[in-house]
Amino acid sequence: MSVYEINLHEAIYSLSDALDLVGVTHIHHGKRVAYMATECGKRMGWQGARLDDLFQAAILHDCGVSRTVVHAQLAQFEWEKEADHCKIGAELLASCSLLHHLATTILHHHTHWSELARLDFPDEVKLAANCIYMVDRVDVLSLGVMSEGKDILLGKQEVRTRIAEKRGSWFHPDLVDAFLAVSGSDAFWLRLDSDNVDGYLATWLAHSSKREMRFNELKCLVKIFSHIVDAKSPFTRQHSDGVASLARYIGGLFELPKKNCEMLELAGFLHDLGKLRVPDELLEKPGRLTEAESTVMRRHSFDTYSVLKNVKGLETIALWAAEHHERVNGAGYPYQLSNGQLSLEARIIAVADVFQALAQQRPYRASLPPDEILRLLKEQVAGNRLDGAIVAQVEANLGACWQAAMPA
Ligand SMILES: [Fe+2]
Ligand SMILES: [Fe+2]
Ligand SMILES: [Fe+2]
């Protein structure tokens, strides 16, 4: 099995960039929460692995949110059904061996301390969850202040008072005291600004090092990304999974080296990451998109690249993923590359993407049977859009391709 050199912190940081896309314009929430949680944690005297875990859980705490409508609710101080996204996020992390130890923290990042205190799991985890809850509310309150057009330095006392009012009920008294201690300075609040918070987090990334990951570890990490994307709409459930397994299968038909086949699978999981930025109503629109809507939709493959390019070790995968809407005749997007410039792998993902999408139901049409999919693929070959040799392989192995694209 191949080994990949990846910096886990860097990968998680990019995962938070992907989650930021869901916010559309309300971005960097996870990053600000990670920064504030870390400051409070340090004040509590936490260090080493405990602080690293807090940071990772904090930056990912809203990974259960992939729909833009749900994201809009995060900005309220309290809302109905807030436990749903905690549960989805916890399940997501529990499925990955590298992150499953953070699942309980995520599960309880909206649980009041009065209730948490009575639950039966380690205090360390309870405090981490409660710390994230507290600073998450700080972020929401500060956004509220700023949305009224007030400077955060003028509103900071109001936020501190609101948090202090929940001392002992919503939040552990020691956590509130730690927050009040670290948030006394102007600098604490000025660091919430995007550029400053990025700088703060970059220092964290710098102190962590690359580690070797086996393919299966990397795959489960990458699947977290793809599950977040596919959860955006009931129509796209398992789309990325299907593209991943079909692309890998086609790579095998071309006798590509095993590592390339694995990378094809990973690129398949990641190809639509940029769709996190597309508003739900566009993905679920029953009719044709207007020109303006298409423009919003079309930027997703470029956004996929923007998120992935920062993870060292994933550069090639990022490229293949970003090129899934390029076409052989140069009429695709976003780079308008043409045949000679497109790798075989990028062309394979393009075919796998079209195949899987046609096999699934869409708001504007039913799912299509294999022979109908093949007919449409051949039409695309005739128009010099998809690669003829790849579609010929698909034709020769149609049943197996269908099975790969539609995992049970
Ligand atoms: Fe949050
Ligand atoms: Fe796409
Ligand atoms: Fe896709």
Image (cartoon, rainbow, N blue to C red):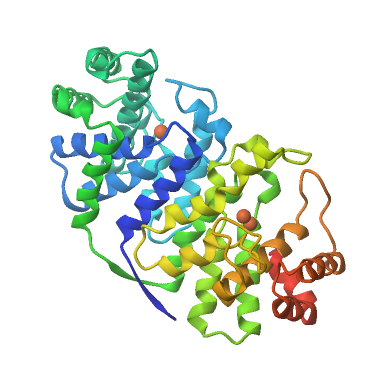
Question: In screen coordinates, is 162 left or right of 273?
Answer: left
Viewer-closest of 117 and 26: 26
In this view, 53 is above or below 35: below
In this view, 148 is above or below 3: above
Residue 242 shows up from this direction: yes
Identified at 50% across, 42% down, the residue is 64
Tell me how many marks there are: 0
Viewer-closest of 29 and 343: 343
Quadrant assignment, res 99: bottom left
Quadrant assignment, res 142: top left
Identified at 58% across, 31% down, the residue is 69
Identified at 70% across, 40% down, the residue is 284
- Place of residue 22 in the rendered image (x, y in percent of width and height, measured from the top left): 50, 39
Question: In screen coordinates, is 314 left or right of 333?
Answer: left
The N terminus sits in image quarter: bottom left
- Place of residue 118 in the rendered image (x, y in percent of width and height, measured from the top left): 35, 31
In this view, 107 is above or below 393: above
Question: In screen coordinates, is 7 left or right of 386?
Answer: left
The quadrant where ligand 3 appears is bottom right
- Place of residue 339 in the rendered image (x, y in percent of width and height, measured from the top left): 62, 73
The C terminus sits in image quarter: bottom right
Identified at 60% across, 56% down, the residue is 333
Residue 101 shows up from this direction: no
